[in-house]
Every structure is written in structure tokens, then in C-alpha cells.
């Protein structure tokens, strides 16, 4: 029996933390939080043991600037205590990036991805069942304008007199949360399983979320992924266009999509006018929801019937943080894009696939963010920071020689 010491305990906790984080990103917020806390404890222990040296990720400067202006916005907001509490609730998500970057070795990466993709495959099967036979959540459809929701937090998909189809919502009860979640994970599943049934199931499940912003992000991101990884022409993503055309062609659905777009544009206009009242420092982090609740008549009815948001991740940052916070947010994205770009040609093909899959997932959610506020959802926010940590770790591949092709094998 091995002797229990601090190193042995930290290694055991690391394995547990990896499993909890990977599984929690698909199944449960509490499991995900437990994983982050386990990994934080391991990081502290390994720093104390001298096994981990703190080094820069290259993102500290833009992160500092963004959070500095975000805190100023919170202090100047009408309800400063609430805004500051909001920042602290969101701030710890970034720990996931540093935990992956500092703690994960090649064996840990393997364990993390294996757990993540299999839990995603299981979630995809369950969610496809939701959509096809109405597990847990159900929507009823009929030709005409009237519809009934059995689950108030859900939205209708489309109307048809003979077809009953339900939203795939995963285990978080929201098609938008699930859509963003699967949008980032589906490319990792592609990289791990390639053409196996898990890839097809994951694709079907996230499409059945019927989150149109997710489809938008996937369409453009998939073309990049297939160009970089699969080395296939862009026609390989023709299926997604055909699928969207099929959905639009369903009787009554085109008018529904038109109404959604009109409502979204109207929401953007109202949000922009709200920003004009507090242009430089905004209304404070978390203050947008209070404004919607106080002025429901200013927004479309479909907007206030659900959880209020600005219908755009970027517009929400502008309204809540003001111009200064928004500019530093864009600066963070620019620096991160530059930091993430490029990978060693010596990296083995397997790890290149995971690198490009992670980059594609982040790029896809950034595109989809023009039409939804994915960063405000805890599981999606943590997943974004986790994938950022994975990219940084893989890009700095000198940490593991076994991940590199021997130099004599390079032409």
C-alpha cells in the first residue's frame, strides 16, 4: 500500500478533479463546481510542493484591464453592491483556464478528453430522446399562431399539424444553454471519434436544440474545421445548409423565423437606446435584467416572456460595462486570438485535431454570441475558459515531448 503523503493526495485529487470537471460540463453545475474546487486545491498543493511554477499565459494584461474597468462600472452603478457581487459570482469561472494550463500533463489531457467526449455522447443520446419522444420537456404544436408550452422556460420550435417535435435541452432545461454547450463540444467529439456514431449523435442533438444562433455559429466554424483538420472542400458542410432550408420550408415556420428576427432587431434597438443613457460606464454588471423588469413595455412580448437578455453577448457587455469595459473586452478577444493562433508543426496529428477542435468551438460560440448571451450561462462560461486553457496548454506543447513528432520524421 503506497504511503499517503501530500504528493500522493494531490495526484489522487487531480484525477478526481479532472473527472468532475469534464463530467460536470455536460451533466451538472454542482459537479462542475466541485471539479473546479478540487483542481484549485490541487494547484495550491502542487505550488507548495514546487511541482508547478506560475508563469504567464499572455492574457493577464487584457484580463486585468477588462476586470478593472468592469469593477469601476460596478462601483458607479445604481446598485453597486449587487453589481460587485455579480462580478465575484462570475470571476471564479476563469480558474478553469489556469487549472488546465498549470496542472494538466499529457495523461491528464487524455483522461479529460475521454471523460468529456463520452459524457457528451451520453448527453447527446438523452437529448435526442428529448426531441424525438419528449423526455422530460415537451412542446405542443399546431398550425396557426396559438401554441402551448408544457415547460414555461422553453420556446416553440416550429408548427405542423401532424408532427410533434420537442426541443433538445440537455440537463440544464434550456435549448439555448444546451445549444451553446454542444456547439463547443461537438468539434471535440468529431476530433475524438471522427466518423463513428458518437459524432452523428452529437450533431443531431445540437441541431435539435433548434437554436438558430448556434446553427449560425456552427455553419461558419465547421467550414474552418473541415478545411484545417479534415482537409476536405467546403461542400462537406452542405448538409447544415440543407437542414436549415428544410426547417424553413415547413409550413408556418418561415413566418415564425421572420417574427423572431424582427423581435431580435427591436430588442437590439431598445438595448442600444438604454446604452445611450449610460454610455461610458454602463448600468453595472448584472444591471440589464433590472432594466428589463422595470421597463417591460419597451421590449417585444417574446423577449420579456423568457429570461431577459440583450439578445447579443457583445451588446450586453456594452450596456452593462459601458464603452471602456467593452473596448477592453474586445482587446481581450484580440489578444487571445493572437495568442491562440498557430501550432507547432511538430505536434502529433492527434493533438492537432484537439487543438483545432477547441479553437473551432471557441470561434463558433463567439460568432453565435452576436445573437445570444452565452457568457451569462455558468456552464457555457466555464466551458469557454476550459477550452481556452486547453488551447494554451496544447500550443505550449514543449511541456511534453511525447506529444511531438521526432524531428527526424519531419520532411
Image: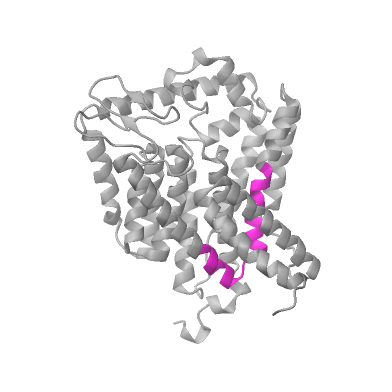
Q: Which residues are magenta?
A: 91-113
Q: What's the residue at 74%, 63% (across, down)? A: 54
Place of residue 301 in the rendered image (x, y in percent of width and height, measured from the top left): 43, 18
Q: Is residue 44 above or below residue 323?
A: below
Q: Is residue 340 above or below residue 275?
A: below
Front residue of 331/187: it is 187
Please state if 206 lies on the left or on the right of 181 as rendered. left
Asked which colour scheme the image uses, the reply is one colour
| Residue 227 in view of the camera | yes
Question: What type of secondary structure mainly makes up the magenta span?
Answer: helix
What is the residue that sits farthest to the top in this orientation?
297
* Quadrant in which the N terminus is drawn: bottom right
Q: What's the residue at 31%, 62% (across, down)? A: 232
Q: Quadrant of residue 289?
A: top right
Front residue of 408/21: it is 21
Please state if 168 lies on the left or on the right of 267 as rendered. left
Front residue of 392/98: it is 98
Front residue of 176/396: it is 176
Q: What's the residue at 53%, 45% (across, down)? A: 380
Q: How many marks?
A: 0
Amino acid at each position: 500500500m503506497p504511503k499517503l503523503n501530500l504528493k500522493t493526495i494531490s495526484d489522487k485529487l487531480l484525477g478526481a478533479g479532472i473527472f468532475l470537471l469534464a463530467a460536470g460540463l455536460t451533466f451538472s453545475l454542482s459537479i462542475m463546481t466541485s471539479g473546479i474546487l478540487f483542481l484549485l486545491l490541487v494547484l495550491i498543493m502542487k505550488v507548495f510542493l514546487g511541482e508547478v511554477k506560475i508563469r504567464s499565459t499572455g492574457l493577464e494584461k487584457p484580463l486585468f484591464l477588462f476586470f478593472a474597468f468592469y469593477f469601476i462600472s460596478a462601483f458607479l452603478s445604481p446598485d453597486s453592491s449587487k453589481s460587485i457581487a455579480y462580478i465575484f459570482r462570475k470571476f471564479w469561472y476563469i480558474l478553469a483556464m489556469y487549472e488546465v494550463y498549470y496542472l494538466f500533463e499529457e495523461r491528464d489531457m487524455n483522461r479529460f478528453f475521454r471523460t468529456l467526449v463520452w459524457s457528451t455522447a451520453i448527453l447527446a443520446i438523452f437529448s435526442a430522446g428529448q426531441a424525438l419522444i419528449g423526455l422530460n420537456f415537451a412542446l405542443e404544436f399546431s398550425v396557426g399562431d396559438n401554441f402551448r408550452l408544457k415547460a414555461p422556460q422553453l420556446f416553440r420550435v416550429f408548427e405542423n399539424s401532424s408532427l410533434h417535435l420537442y426541443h433538445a435541452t440537455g440537463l440544464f432545461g434550456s435549448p439555448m444553454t444546451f445549444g451553446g454547450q454542444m456547439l463547443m463540444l461537438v468539434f471535440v467529439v468529431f476530433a475524438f471519434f471522427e466518423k463513428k456514431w458518437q459524432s452523428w449523435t452529437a450533431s443531431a442533438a445540437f441541431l435539435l436544440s433548434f437554436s438558430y444562433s448556434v446553427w449560425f455559429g456552427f455553419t461558419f466554424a465547421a467550414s474552418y474545421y473541415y478545411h484545417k483538420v479534415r482537409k476536405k472542400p467546403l461542400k462537406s458542410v452542405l448538409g447544415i445548409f440543407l437542414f436549415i432550408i428544410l426547417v424553413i420550408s415547413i409550413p408556418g415556420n418561415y413566418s415564425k423565423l421572420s417574427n423572431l428576427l424582427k423581435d431580435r432587431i427591436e430588442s437590439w434597438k431598445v438595448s442600444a437606446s438604454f446604452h445611450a443613457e449610460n454610455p461610458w460606464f454602463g448600468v453595472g454588471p448584472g444591471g440589464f435584467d433590472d432594466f428589463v423588469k422595470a421597463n417591460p413595455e419597451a421590449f417585444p412580448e417574446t423577449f420579456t416572456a423568457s429570461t431577459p437578455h440583450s439578445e447579443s453577448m457583445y451588446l450586453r457587455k456594452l450596456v452593462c460595462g459601458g464603452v471602456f469595459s467593452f473596448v477592453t473586452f474586445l482587446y481581450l478577444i484580440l489578444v487571445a486570438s493572437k495568442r491562440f493562433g498557430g501550432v507547432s508543426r511538430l505536434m502529433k496529428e492527434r493533438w492537432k485535431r484537439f487543438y483545432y477542435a477547441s479553437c473551432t468551438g471557441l470561434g463558433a460560440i463567439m460568432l453565435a454570441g452576436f445573437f445570444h448571451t452565452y457568457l451569462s450561462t455558468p456552464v457555457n462560461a466555464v466551458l469557454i475558459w476550459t477550452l481556452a486553457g486547453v488551447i494554451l496548454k496544447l500550443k505550449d506543447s514543449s511541456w511534453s515531448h511525447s506529444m511531438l513528432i521526432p524531428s527526424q520524421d519531419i520532411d
